Structure formats: C-alpha cells, structure tokens
Image: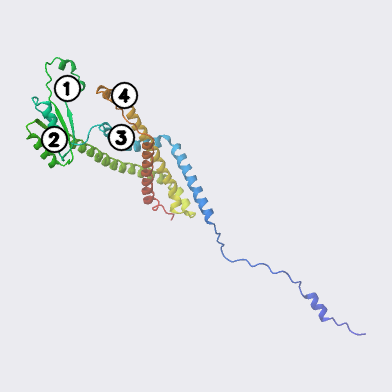
Amino acid sequence: MKPHTPNPNKNTRRSQPQSRAPEPRRAAGAVTAHTSVGDRWHGWLGHHREMAGESLRRFFATPLASAMTALVIAIALALPAALQLGLVNFQRAVAGWDGQPQISVFLHKEARDSAVQSFADKLRADPAIAEVTYISPEAALAEFQQSSGLGDALAGLGANPLPAVLLLRPRDTSGEQLEFLAQRLRDSAMTDSVVLDMAWVQRLAQLTDLGRRLSAGLAVLLAMGVLLVVVNTIRLHIESRREEILVVKLVGATDAFVRRPFLYSGLCYGFFGGLLAWLLVALGVALLAGPVAGLSSSYGSAYSLSGPGISYLLGLTAGAALLGLIGAWLAVARHIKAIEPK
C-alpha cells in the first residue's frame, strides 16, 4: 500500500488568495478648492448688498442718536449751501442791470435841438464809442416821475428842470481809456457835466467775487467739520464692535471685509445729513419768499426767490454722502489695523 503524497500544485492553488481590484490612491494633505471669477464676483456683490442693508438697519435701530448725528451734518452743510443759493439769487436779481460801463453826458439846457442832433451824430461816428442813446428832456422827466413816485409834485412845476442826456457805451472798457474819453467829452462846449458810471459796476463785481470766495471758504471749513463728525461717530461704532471684529479676524476675515459695513454706515450718515440740509435750505427759502416778493413788488418788479431744485438736492446729497464715505474711510484706516487677535 502506497503512502499518500499530497499534490503540490493543488495545495498551491488553494493557498493563493483571490486577486482584488486595486484601490484608488488618495492625495495626501489638504485639498485646495478653486472658485471661479463669476462666483467671486457674485459673492462680492452679495456681501455689499448685505452690508448696505445691515447699515440701514443699524441706522434706524437707534433713531435718536442717528438723527442727532445727521442733524449736525445737515446744519454744517446748510450754512454754505444757503450762502451759495443766496449768491445765485443775488446774481439773478442784478442780471437785468447793465453790467457795462456807461458814460452819461448831460447837455446844456440852452442847446438847440439841431446842435444836439449834430453832436450826437458826431459821437456816433467816433470809433471809440460803440453806441449813443439820446434821451430828450421830456422823456427824462417822464421816466423820473415813474421811478420816483413824485408825479404830482413835478406836475406843479412850470418848466422841465431836466436837460437832454446822451448815454454813451464805449468800445474800450479799460480804466485809462474811459477816463480819457470822459475828459474829452467834458472839454466839449455842448456838455454841462459828464458822469462815468463805472464805480458801481466795479463794486458789484467785487461784491460778487467776495461772496463767492466767502462761500467757498465756509464750505471748506464746514466740510472739514463734517469729516470730523463722521470720523468720531465711526470710531465709536468700531469700539462698540471690537469683540465682533476680533472674532471675524480670527476666522480669516480681511481688513476689506471688516471695513465694509463701517463705510456703508458713513455713507448713510452723509446721505441723510445732505437730505436734511436740503430740507433746511428749502424751509428757509419758503419762509423768506413772501417778504422778498412783497419788497420787490413795491419797486415794481416781479422778482421772486429761487429755491433749491432737484439738481441742488442731488448735488447736496451726493456731496454729503461722499464726505461721509471719506470720513468713514479715515476712521476705519486708523482704528481697524489696531484691532488684531493675539
């Protein structure tokens, strides 16, 4: 009887394990997620919308404090705005006046009409004179009666006391040429007196320039005051939210992310301050419109005050909002960097 010998090939087939599919190899370490430009753009816009809405909610959540800050800004902006509007109304009031220098030549009362007409024609042919206007004694008396309101008193006079007048408009308005022309007219035998009406034109131009410069200087000073008000207000907001800023910086928030809500807060303060400033100026014009209209009507004029319109509203609110944004930026740039997690 033969001993049983195991088959090595058979045992080998049993002992070999069944082959398995290779498992996929996993990448070692952290995996970086890539976002598209469109996703970043939508996320940036979404955060801006969220911060704008949150700033408005915070503004109206404390109505008394917000209204006081906006009112301070409004008063600071209303002063130069009212001065500028007053300057515009003053320029409108004097727009009908002749702003060119004029020479009034009063002729002798004994001068004959033919001599006066000949003298006027001679002046019209003078190259230094652009225009000559003749006013007869009768026309001068009628105009004086209408403007002075002394018609009854002048009607009792036996004779017309006013002489004939020639109004001359010179071509060259320089001071030396005007004085030379006026002196040449005084030397004429036809003239009784010559009046150079240039001083009031110069005074009017200087007064307008003074008002313009005063308005600009006051606007610059009060704009700096608005910036200081916004800077101080935003600084208090930053200090009240210090813990919140520390938390968001710990999780990786950038300075741009942190400063965004404060910039919108400054924008809100400036916008509503400008809106209140426009309302204050409009209220002032409404209060003065009646007395100004009554005063102008007493002088036979239909002049009325011009109030701040829509363009004035847009310019004032946009400028105030820009000042609020700049003030908030200055406050945030100084105080946000000082708040860092340890």
Q: Is residue 178 left or right of residue 267?
A: left
Q: How would you rate the neighbour count of disc 4 (Cα within 10 Å): few for under 14, some for 14-19, many for 20 or more?
A: few
Name the foreground residue: 74 vs 281.
281
**Mark 3 — residue?**
85
Work out whether residue 44 can be spotted: yes
Estimate the spatial distance between the alpha carbons at disc 2 and disc 3, rounded to whole Å: 46 Å
**Mark 2 — residue?**
122
Q: How would you rate the neighbour count of disc 2 (Cα within 10 Å): few for under 14, some for 14-19, many for 20 or more?
A: few
Which residue is drawn at the image coordinates 84% and 81% (left, top)? Answer: 7
Q: Amino acid at mark 3?
A: Leu
Q: Amino acid at mark 2?
A: Lys
Estimate the spatial distance between the alpha carbons at disc 3 and disc 1, rounded to whole Å: 42 Å
Q: Amino acid at mark 1?
A: Glu
Compare marks 4 and 3 and give the one earlier in the sequence: 3
**Mark 1 — residue?**
138
Which residue is drawn at the image coordinates 52% and 56% (left, top)? Answer: 37
Q: Position of residue 196 (x, y in %)?
A: 13, 34
Up the image or down, 52 lies above or below 297; here it is below
Up the image or down, 304 lies above or below 15; here it is above
Which residue is drawn at the image coordinates 31% and 26% (left, top)? Answer: 289
Name the foreground residue: 41 vs 149.
149
Dot 4 falls on a residue whose secondary structure is: helix
Q: Position of residue 135 (x, y in %)?
A: 17, 27
**Mark 4 — residue?**
290
Estimate the spatial distance between the alpha carbons at disc 4 and disc 3, rounded to whole Å: 17 Å
